Image (cartoon, grey):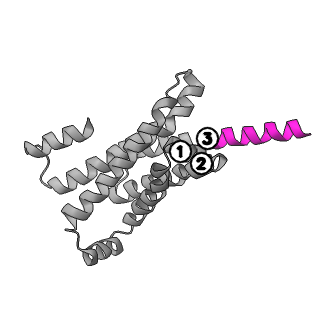
Amino acid sequence: MPLALLVYDTLYGRLGVDPVRDIEHRLGRTALYFLIVTLAVSPIRMAFRINATHLRRALGLLSFSYAFLHLLAWAFFDMGLLWAQMLSDIVKRPYLLFGMTAFILLIPLAMTSNRFSIRKLGRNWRQLHKLIYPAAILVSLHWLWALKLWSGWPLLCTGAIIALLLYRLRRSFAGLSNLFIKNN
């Protein structure tokens, strides 16, 4: 749906004065929103007993797809697929490294989001998919640094990511302490 709205706005000239920038930013924000929702699935299940775990894989893949489109929009529309210009832009705007690193972290998650990989990787699959945590932090830093201002909505999204990661961390420590208590 967000992609359909973006295509509609592009076709009907409903983007701002810098359409390329709008396309890039809307794709990036949508990737971030899907990432936040993906991270929120388990806490929502625990807190409200609403089970949407069957949607988590699709949400994660949507996040990756929008991040891929965000990267493609930058490479095609903004940089014209000129490698030297891309490298120069990365040097000029180092926050791009945060976004690209986050994208690289998400690649193995997208590639192993299938039943075959889950079976083949076994317990390692869960460990691998914890890459979503550093990716979420890098995406937040990429967005905040790119904006160069501390406005409400980006800070709220970053706060949501931090809260979701802290929730996970708290649950991990609770699991470790329960394991310690059982063993003693």
Q: Which residue is mark 3?
A: 168
The residue sitting at 35% across, 48% down in the picture is 65
Q: Secondary structure at mark 1?
A: helix
Q: Is residue 111 visible?
A: yes
Q: Residues within 10 Å of mark 1 (few under 14, many from 20)?
A: few
Mark nearest the camera among 3 and 1 is: 1
Give the amino acid type for the residue marked by disc 1 in the picture: Phe
7 horizontally vs 26: left or right: left
112 horizontally vs 179: left or right: left
Most foreground residue, 30 or 52: 52
Q: Which residue is mark 1?
A: 116
Image: 132 above or below 57:
below
Q: Position of residue 167 (x, y in %)?
A: 60, 38
Considering only order in the chain, which callout, 1 or 3, is on the residue closer to the N terminus?
Answer: 1
The residue sitting at 48% across, 45% down in the picture is 113
Q: Which residue is mark 2?
A: 120
Residues marked 1 and 2 touching at CB (< 8 Å): yes
Give the amino acid type for the residue marked by disc 2 in the picture: Lys
Between the C-alphas of marks 3 and 1, the distance is: 26 Å
Most foreground residue, 107 or 150: 107
Between the C-alphas of marks 3 and 2, the distance is: 25 Å
Considering only order in the chain, which callout, 2 or 3, is on the residue closer to the N terminus?
Answer: 2
Q: Secondary structure at mark 3?
A: helix
- The span picked out in magenta is 166-184
Between the C-alphas of marks 1 and 2, the distance is: 6 Å
The residue sitting at 21% across, 56% down in the picture is 21
The residue sitting at 64% across, 50% down in the picture is 124
Which of the 4 quarters of the picture holds residue 101? bottom left
